[in-house]
Image (cartoon, rainbow, N blue to C red):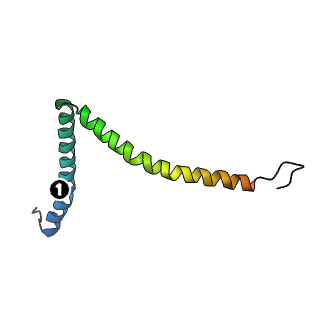
């Protein structure tokens, strides 16, 4: 019996080979990262500088939004609560 290898056979092989090649490249990259983590020295100075930069950049906008929001919420709450019995507004 003769087997037919036409364009359909090649396209099926390519359809299987390309995703497997990508998966293999992913695992190769993951292995390279794992080896790099073990071999290289952890850069504590760089970590601290980056952490401080992110904290500094995010704290100021948080405070600038939180203060007016808190003031607005507290004044809104005061106006929506009913007065105690026996007192008028």
Query: Could you tell me residue 32's position as x and y percent?
Result: 17, 39
Q: Quadrant of the C terminus?
A: bottom right
Along the viewing direction, whichever of 78 and 26 lies nearer the viewer: 78
Along the viewing direction, whichever of 1 and 37 lies nearer the viewer: 37
Q: Name the residue: 17% across, 67% down.
A: 8
Q: Quadrant of the N terminus?
A: bottom left
Q: Pick out the residue farthest to the right.
A: 86
Q: Pick out the residue farthest to the left.
A: 2
Query: Could you tell me residue 9's position as x and y percent?
Result: 15, 64
Quarter of the rendering containing residue 37: top left
Determine the secondary structure under disc 1. Answer: helix
Quarter of the rendering containing residue 52: top left
Q: Is residue 2 left or right of residue 52?
A: left
Density class for disc 1 (Cα within 10 Å; few <14, some 14-19, many ≥20) is few
Labels in figure, total? 1
Q: Name the residue: 22% across, 41% down.
A: 30
Q: Which residue was labeled with disc 1?
A: 17
Query: Could you tell me residue 29's position as x and y percent?
Result: 19, 44
């Amino acid at each position: 019996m003769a087997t037919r290898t036409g364009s359909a056979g090649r396209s099926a092989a390519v359809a299987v080979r390309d995703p497997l090649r990508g998966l293999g490249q992913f695992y190769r990259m993951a292995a390279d990262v794992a080896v790099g983590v073990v071999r290289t020295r952890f850069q504590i100075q760089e970590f601290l500088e980056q952490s401080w930069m992110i904290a500094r950049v995010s704290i100021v906008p948080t405070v600038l939004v939180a203060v007016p929001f808190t003031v607005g919420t507290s004044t809104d709450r005061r106006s929506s609560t009913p007065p105690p019995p026996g007192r008028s507004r």
